[in-house]
Image (cartoon, rainbow, N blue to C red):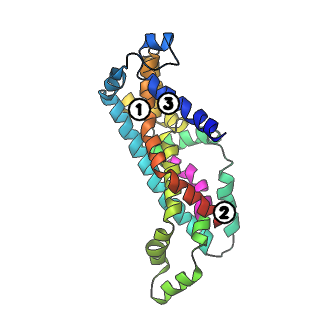
Amino acid sequence: MGLVGIALTLGPILYLIIGGFRSQQNLATNPTGLPDPWMWSNYIDILKEGTFWRQALNSLVVALGTTVGVVLFGTMAAYPLARYRFAGREFIYLIFVTGLMFPLTVAVLPLYFMIRGLGLTGSLWGLIVPQIAFALPITVIIMRPFLKAIPNELEEAAFVDGVTRVGFFWRIVLPLAGPGMVTVGVLAFIGSWNAYLLPLLLLTGPQEGMTLPLGVTAFQGAHASSTTLIMAYTSLSMIPALIFFLLLERRIVDGLTGAVKG
């Protein structure tokens, strides 16, 4: 069953990548066989286009900006909810939990007017800020157990040594919460890289200002008759996020395991 699951997961991805090496005729006559001949030019032609690299840079800037914001603000929001007792603590945490049940599609229209009112439509910042906000609930839920598990004795010893609460957070809490921060960071990066609805709404303008998911759609419209080129473009757009996930997959599992134990 495990092999069947792996085949069902990786099969479509491999077919898409290999399909990018086909010619249109080969795809029509032998769709399940290997390419004959291998059309390396499909990928090379796309990589020669400046638009592709500009969209890849936009996706990278948005994904990195979102990841840094989510990790930083998510950890800062989870810290008092995990370490301090105050009136309304559980209610505030409940608000974050409720955020998981708030679909993006419900907020799209008012969010668009808000971003437009700030003059950020068509700007990468106008995309980064709401993506950080929508990723905060799951970040707080994952980070809270990590921060709660830090021994109180460690905090008391730090205070005796003259460390302030802010210093304790930056110098001791952040290094200890590393596994959880890596987990939420990877999830935020991949979620941002693959995001489509928000970029479609906010990144209006020329193709050079789009992210890669939007670029794939625009490329499909311009090359509707060339399926193999579309497969090559789609493969190239998803490979960075796929590599990033595979490299840090173990960290994600370790982080989620720690959150459950906490």
Magenta span includes 257: no
In the rendered image, residue 198, in percent from the top left (x then y), is placed at 53, 38
Q: Which labelled disc corresponds to residue 177?
A: none
Specify the amino acid type for callout 3.
Leu
Tell whether 12 sits left or right of 208.
right
Q: Residue at x 47, y 52 (%)?
A: 248
Dominant secondary structure (helix, strand or loop) of the stretch shown in magenta: helix
* Distance Cα–Cα, label 2 vs label 1: 39 Å
Q: Earlier in the sequence, mark 2 or mark 3?
A: 3
Specify the amino acid type for callout 2.
Tyr
Crowding around mark 1 (Cα neighbors within 10 Å: few <14, some 14 to 19, many 20+) is many
The residue where tag 3 is placed is 14
Q: Quadrant of the N terminus?
A: top right
* Residue 31 appears in view: yes
Tell whether 63 sits left or right of 258.
left
The residue where tag 2 is placed is 93
Range drawn in magenta:
129-143
The residue where tag 1 is placed is 236
Crowding around mark 3 (Cα neighbors within 10 Å: few <14, some 14 to 19, many 20+) is few
